[in-house]
Image (cartoon, rainbow, N blue to C red):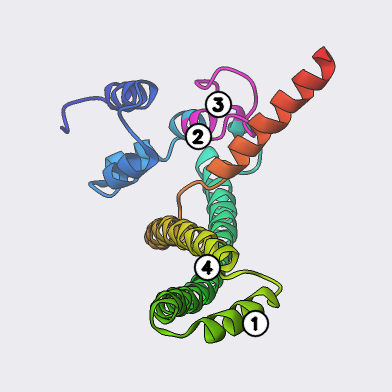
Amino acid sequence: MSGLPDELWRQILEIGIRNSKFSYKDLCCISISCRRLHRLSSEDSLWSQFLFSDFPSTSQQQNPSSNYCRSTSTSAKSTYRIKFEKEKERKLAAHRRAVLRKESEIVERERKIKEIETQWRLETEKMRATSTELSNLHKVRQASVALNVWQPEVVRGRQKQIVEQCVVSVVSRVHSLEMELRLCKQQIAGFNKAHKDEMQRLETAKEELAYMKYHPLQDYRLTRKGDNEGDKKRKKLKRSVKLS
């Protein structure tokens, strides 16, 4: 290693950076291996390339091999450190916002689940009451058939008068209760499906939140899937309005 000139080591490091083989972490690890590499790894020609590749929007639009930071008071390494800290703060702020959005989504889904469970319970109670009333009407009809066989004609005539005075006949009431019972079963099946879907979405949101907390420096600038779908729908609506 001591027999190689500085120029050769400098070219090796530049080739590694230019071919995206080296990152800033690798260069920092190399700099602590010996004094010579520490001196070479701190040169502006290397860190200016990192500035150009890692921060293209903030770096000057020119050849990365040109040492544009030498004309300034700060070195390229110091400039990279400043920009890296700002980028880190931005990512942490974006991460906090993403975590808050995901936590609010979890709270909203838990609220929806409780609402679905409440409606599910009310519909179940309604179905039980309807089923009980329908069963009682069936029993009344069976008892009426039995009485028609055994009771005298006078009693049957009196019973017929009482039944005719009713606003709704027993048969119509039975049909309406059967229809209401079918509707209750359909509603309960719909609530069951909605509850399962919301529980699955809730578990997915909790997993995403755990992933966000485990990876705090991931870039969260991209919009969520729902936002992308909403943008697509709005663009499609605009195109249809223009065509019409």
Residue at the image position 37 percent from the left and 59 percent from the top: 207
Residue 109, x across and y down, in percent: 53, 64
Viewer-side label of 1, 4:
1
- Comparing 126 with 226, the one in front is 126
Boundaries of the magenta span: 50-68
Total marks in image: 4
Residue under label 4: 116
Three-letter amino acid code at disc 3?
A: Asn
Which label sits on residue 67? 3
Residue under label 2: 54
Residue at the image position 32 percent from the left and 28 percent from the top: 13
Mark before the other along the chain sequence, 1 or 3: 3
- For the residues bearing labels 4 and 3, Cβ distance under 8 angstroms: no
Viewer-side label of 1, 2:
1
> Relative to 193, is 116 on the left or the right?
right
Mark before the other along the chain sequence, 2 or 3: 2
Which label sits on residue 162? 1
> Relative to 71, is 150 on the left or the right?
left
Mark 1 crowd level (few <14, some 14–19, many ≥20, 10 Å Cα): few
Does residue 100 appear in the picture of this structure? no
Q: Is residue 224 above or below residue 13?
A: below
Viewer-side label of 1, 3:
1
- For the residues bearing labels 2 and 3, Cβ distance under 8 angstroms: no
Residue 1 lies in quadrant: top left
Q: Secondary structure at mark 1?
A: helix
Mark before the other along the chain sequence, 4 or 3: 3
- For the residues bearing labels 1 and 3, Cβ distance under 8 angstroms: no
Viewer-side label of 2, 3:
2
